[in-house]
Image (tube, grey):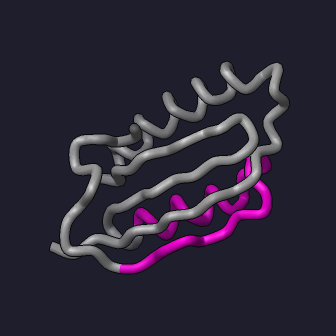
């Protein structure tokens, strides 16, 4: 089975005072949503930037990508890699 993948970085608009609470919200919501749409991946947050690799069925990944592009917590989103992969790298992680 083939999967789509998208790896991006973005700058965060989250205020540092709210970062921990906001990141908890992002992780909890993303794990639930990603599990329901068969998307897996990993998210890194430095306090100033996000980096994420997501993978899954192309229609679900396209919908998730569009949602991230609209998300006001991200700006200056830069795609590092995208395409088709033969197997998942984060098979057991709805979001790590």
Span highlighted in magenta in the image: 60-83
Q: Is residue 72 magenta?
A: yes
- Residue 70 sits in quarter: bottom right
Q: Which of the two residues, 2 or 9, is positioned nearer the viewer here?
A: 9
Q: Is residue 62 left or right of residue 22?
A: left
Q: Residue at x 22, y 50 (%)?
A: 91
- Residue 95 sits in quarter: top left
Residue at the extreme front: 46
As drawn, 70 above or below 13: below
Q: Residue at x 55, y 71 (%)?
A: 80
> Where does residue 42 sit, x and y in percent of width and height?
42, 46
* Image quadrant containing the C terminus: top left
Q: Which of the two residues, 79 or 31, is positioned nearer the viewer here?
A: 79
> Where does residue 72 sit, x and y in percent of width and height?
79, 49
> Where does residue 32 sit, x and y in percent of width and height?
41, 35
Q: Is residue 47 left or right of residue 25?
A: right
- Residue 93 sits in quarter: top left
* Image quadrant containing the N terminus: bottom left
Q: Residue at x 81, y 27 (%)?
A: 16
Q: Is residue 75 magenta?
A: yes
Q: Is residue 92 left or right of residue 47?
A: left
As drawn, 4 above or below 47: below
Q: Residue at x 57, y 52 (%)?
A: 51
As drawn, 54 above or below 25: below
């Amino acid at each position: 089975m083939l999967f789509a993948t998208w790896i991006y970085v973005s700058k965060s608009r989250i205020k540092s005072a709210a970062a921990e609470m906001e990141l908890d919200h992002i992780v909890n919501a993303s794990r639930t949503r990603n599990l329901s749409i068969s998307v897996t991946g990993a998210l890194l947050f430095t306090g100033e930037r996000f980096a994420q690799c997501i993978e899954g069925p192309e229609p679900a990944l396209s919908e998730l990508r569009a949602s991230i592009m609209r998300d006001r917590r991200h700006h200056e989103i830069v795609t590092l890699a995208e395409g088709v992969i033969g197997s998942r790298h984060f098979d057991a992680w709805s979001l790590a």
